[in-house]
Every structure is written in C-alpha cells, then in structure tokens.
Image (spheres, rainbow, N blue to C red):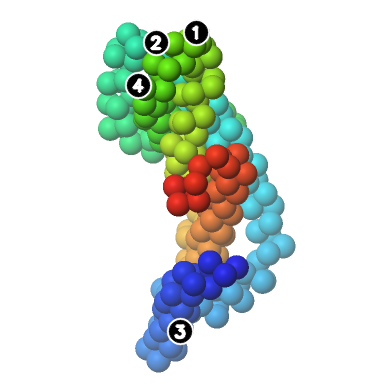
Amino acid sequence: MKRWIQKGWRPTTLIILLLVLWEGSSRWLDIPAWLLPSPSQIWKEVLVSWSDFQGHLLATIRLTFIGFICGSIIGLGVATILHLMPKVRETVYPLIIISQNIPTIVLAPLLVIWFGFGILPKVIVITLFCFFPIAIATLDGLRQTTDELKHYMLMVGASKGQIFRKLEWPHALPSIFSGLKIAATYSVMGAVISEWLGGNHGIGVFMTLASSSFRTDRVFVSILYIVILCLLFFSMIVTAERRLIRWKPKGEKR
C-alpha cells in the first residue's frame, strides 16, 4: 500500500484528469453519443448492460484461460526441447522467428476453414499469441546461467538433467515470468480477436454487435472490460512470480 501511494498516485491522477477533460469536452462541444460518448454515459451503460454482458464476459474468461494454458505448455515445452537439443534449436529457432512475420489475424479465416466455427480455432489463435513470448523468454532465460556454476556442478558429478532441474531452470524463472506476463495480456486480446471469427458469446461478439448497431457506448464498455481483464491477469502472474521467486533480492525482482 505504501509503495502504491509513493508511485501509483501520479498515473492515477493523470487518468482522473484525462477523464475530467474528456467529460468536459463531450458536454461543452455537445458531441453525439454515437460518435464519442462521455465517461458518465459509458459508466451508465456499464450498469445497465451488465445483465446482458456477464455471459459474454464469462465466455471470454474461459476462452482466455484455456488458450493461455495451452500456449504456456507448448511454449515451455518447445523451449525446453530446443535448449536441451542444440542441433534441433539451430534448425527450428529461425523458423520460429520467421513465423512471427505472419500476422495471426491473417491465419484466422484459414483456421475456420480447417477446423470449423467451434472452440478449437479460437484456442489455436490464442495459443499462437501466447507461444512466441513464452518460448523466446524461456530460451533466453535458460541460456543466462553462468558457465562457472555449470562447471562447478559438473565437478561435483551432476548429470545434464540435474544441471537443468537444479540450476538452469531456477535461474530462468524470472525470464519465464516475463514471458508469461506478456502472454497474459496477449491472451485476452487473442480471445477477443478469435471471437470475431464467429460464435454466440464473448466480448468480441458483444463488441461486434455493438459497433454494427452504432452503440459506441457499448464498444467502450467492451474496451473497459478488456483492460480490466488484462490488468487482473497480469496481476495474477505478478503475484505468482513473487511467491515462487523468493531467492532473488528485492532489488532484482521484476
């Protein structure tokens, strides 16, 4: 709490000032609600539309969680294999980098053609969003272990597996959590984008219906909940990081 008071009041004050400026400009310039609703109109819509919106919110949370878990498992697994098998890494790593030059949103229509309109293509989209930051961060973290520590463990007779489990993996945890934090925010955006592919529930569906009917206030409601979900998911990863990485000095925690 003390830390928030010291560092958090500045961005909070800025956000409040921007909202006040937005509210005042909307009323003074008499901007139509369909063009740019004021913060008070958006908040009113948050309260009014909650009964209709909560089902979409729960659907997006469920989809985000599934996609994030799949992306994390695949990203960590691929990074581990590439680290333990250098020759495979030299072959596959450039392909992983090249794959990121293909926009994921471009693959979405193809995924619908291949897998239909069910949950599978949506999960694949989120997995693709999460995979890259987790895999790259994990690979970088596993390579940060100093040669001196590896040499010391080899001197005491440690096997390659023991070095990985007891030295390289713990040292890679800060980097892994950095990738997880990036993927946490990507997963929410990936879920919303994947819901644009089709379906009956989800924030992406709610946003599409709102924009097609010129309900700009509902579009901003969707954006507000997306931001809140990203912050909550990010905070969960930060909390897990603080609980699991207790061996690092406070000044080194990310």
Cα separation, mark 4 vs mark 1, equals 15 Å
Q: In the depicted view, which residue is nearer to us: 209 or 11?
A: 11
> Residue 105 in the image: x percent, y percent?
39, 38
**Viewer-nearest residue: 219 or 237:** 237
The amino acid on which the numbered mark 1 sits, given as a three-letter code, is Gly
Q: Percent position (x, y) of residue 147?
A: 35, 21
- Depth check: give the residue in front, 66 or 34: 66
Camera-side mark, 4 or 2: 4
Q: Earlier in the sequence, mark 4 or mark 1?
A: 4
Q: Which mark lies nearer to you, 1 or 3? A: 1
Amino acid carrying mark 4 in the image: Asp
Give me the residue at 33% from left, 36% from top. 103
Q: Is residue 2 above or below residue 20?
A: above
Tell me which amino acid carries mark 2.
Met
Q: CA distance from mark 2 to mark 3?
A: 56 Å
Closest to the camera, between mark 2 and mark 1, is: 1
Label 4 close to label 1 by CB (< 8 Å): no
Q: Please tell me which of labels 2 and 3 falls first in the chain.
A: 3
Q: Label 3 belongs to which residue?
A: 20
**Residue 93: in sight, yes or no?**
yes
Measure the alpha-carbon separation of dots 4 and 3: 55 Å
Amino acid, disc 3: Val
Q: Which residue is mark 2?
A: 85
**Does residue 223 appear left or right of residue 136 in this picture?**
right
Callout 1: few (<14), some (14-19), or many (20+) C-alpha neighbours within 10 Å? few
Distance of label 2 from label 1 (alpha carbons): 21 Å
Image spot of residue 41 (x, y percent): 55, 78
* Residue assigned mark 1: 157
Say if mark 4 contacts mark 2, CB within 8 Å: no
Instruction: Please name the residue shown 51% across and 77% down the image.
Output: 39
Which label sits on residue 147? 4
